[in-house]
Image (cartoon, rainbow, N blue to C red):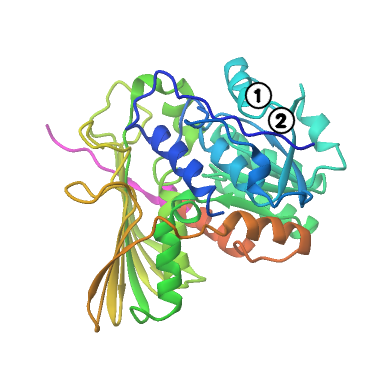
């Protein structure tokens, strides 16, 4: 069935939080077509008819359903598939408040009481999920075993055993297990940087430096957010974005962790929580450094000053993805320096192709959005970095 996208005003949420920024980002990206959160919030703004996302009179390309609403990314994930030609047919979740918010946003999507009803519906081709992190891998395995494709929020897994089982089932079923690494797929500047690298704008990329600071907003988080067994650790969780970008921009198909570490620097009230982590890694086509943390100050106008630097043999690219703290408004800022000249590129109108590519992959059994090998290798690196990480205790 088709449905209308109903945007409503976000209530009791500060506009500078990560979730507020992400929902604005995905609303804006609809015109051209990620952290753990305890709540999900529909997008701000006036009501928009979802049929505008497709050509008038066009038929949906695929039918899909949603299982699990525990991360606010579920709205961006859902909208990404809708705008690519997907028809949202049904959804399920356990939490009444999350069910109510999702149903209000997507009123024509049928709520069902069990996963089984969706998994056994032969008309459904894709399952989209932002369930609690430790539930995503097992769910994706069941989805593939039921002959459907799967799109997960990050991290796609919280243990190497989950990853290996998913790899085995994916080989057997030939289904798609995709993880929406939104800091690349949902960020226009990052997509533009990929185009420039492919065009040879900075020569061969030999190192990436990815910085992923986040605002904690602890009072708004559910208990599982602070349980390492459930969220997987900081390098597994928000670090997975950075591993994805390292592999993509260097073109590495093999990589290893040189060193990794984590710490709980300033949150003793949450003993299982990690608020800082960093990694050095080496691939067969480049090297990388990653730093992630939960220390974004309240004075910043967005959830985090996400940055990516690509060092090439003929120049470099620096991305200020979400803010320019002392200059230009908004996000999607790209700075290119090569043998010709330094230049600034505003990427606000850059198309985001991931959704359309994934839908076409589902229809054509191709791998244009992201190869399965890449998807799983990202999580293998994140999980290895987490497992090998040394705990750092700073003296007071």
Residue 338 occupies quadrant = bottom left
Q: Pick the quarter of the image with the N terminus.
A: top right
- Which residues fall within the magenta stretch? 384-396
Residue 141 against residue 103 in the figure, above or below:
below
On residue 103, the disc is 1
* Cβ atoms under marks 2 and 1 closer than 8 Å: yes
Taking the view exactly as shown, the residue that stands out farthest to the front is: 56
Q: Residue at x 60, y 29 (%)?
A: 6
Taking the view exactly as shown, the residue that stands out farthest to the right is: 122
Q: Position of residue 388 (x, y in %)?
A: 40, 51
Residue 49 occupies quadrant = top right
Q: Position of residue 154 (x, y in %)?
A: 52, 44
Q: Pick the quarter of the image with the C terminus.
A: top left
Q: Position of residue 30 (x, y in %)?
A: 54, 47
In this orientation, which residue lies closer to the viewer: 242 or 121? 121
For residue 375, side relative to residue 227 (left or right): right
Residue receiving disc 2: 91
Residue 132 against residue 199 in the figure, above or below:
above
Mark 2, secondary structure of its residue? strand
The span from disc 2 to disc 1 (Cα, nearest Å) is 9 Å
First of labels 2, 1 by sequence position: 2
């Amino acid at each position: 069935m088709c449905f209308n996208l109903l945007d409503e005003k976000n209530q009791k949420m500060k506009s500078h939080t990560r979730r507020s920024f992400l929902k604005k980002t995905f609303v804006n990206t609809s015109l051209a077509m990620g952290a753990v959160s305890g709540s999900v919030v529909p997008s701000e703004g006036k009501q928009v008819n979802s049929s505008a996302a497709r050509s008038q009179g066009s038929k949906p390309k695929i039918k899909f359903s949603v299982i699990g609403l525990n991360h606010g990314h579920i709205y961006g994930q859902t909208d990404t598939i809708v705008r690519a030609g997907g028809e949202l047919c049904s959804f399920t979740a356990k939490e009444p408040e999350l069910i109510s918010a999702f149903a209000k946003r997507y009123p024509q999507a049928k709520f069902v009481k069990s996963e089984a009803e969706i998994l056994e519906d032969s008309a459904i081709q894709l399952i989209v999920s932002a369930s609690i992190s430790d539930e995503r891998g097992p769910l994706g395995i069941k989805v593939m075993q039921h002959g459907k494709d799967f799109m997960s929020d990050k991290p796609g897994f919280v243990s190497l055993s989950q990853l290996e089982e998913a790899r085995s089932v994916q080989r057997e079923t030939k289904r798609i297990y995709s993880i929406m690494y939104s800091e690349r797929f949902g960020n226009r500047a990052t997509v533009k940087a990929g185009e420039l690298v492919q065009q040879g704008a900075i020569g061969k990329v030999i190192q990436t430096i990815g910085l992923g600071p986040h605002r904690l907003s602890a009072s708004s988080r559910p208990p599982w957010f602070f349980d390492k067994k459930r969220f997987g650790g900081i390098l597994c969780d928000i670090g997975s974005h950075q591993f994805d970008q390292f592999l993509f921009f260097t073109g590495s198909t093999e990589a290893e962790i040189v060193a990794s570490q984590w710490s709980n620097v300033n949150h003793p009230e949450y003993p299982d929580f990690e608020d800082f982590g960093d990694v050095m890694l080496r691939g067969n086509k480049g090297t990388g450094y990653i730093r992630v943390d939960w220390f974004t100050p309240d004075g910043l106008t967005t959830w985090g000053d996400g940055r990516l630097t690509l060092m090439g043999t003929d120049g470099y690219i620096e991305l200020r993805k979400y803010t320019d703290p002392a200059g230009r408004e908004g996000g999607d800022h790209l700075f290119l320096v090569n043998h010709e000249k330094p230049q600034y590129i505003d990427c606000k109108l850059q198309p985001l192709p991931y959704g359309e590519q994934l839908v076409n992959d589902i229809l054509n059994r191709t791998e244009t959005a992201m190869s399965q090998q890449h998807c799983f290798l990202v999580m293998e690196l994140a999980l290895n970095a987490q497992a090998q990480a040394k705990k750092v205790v700073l003296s007071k």
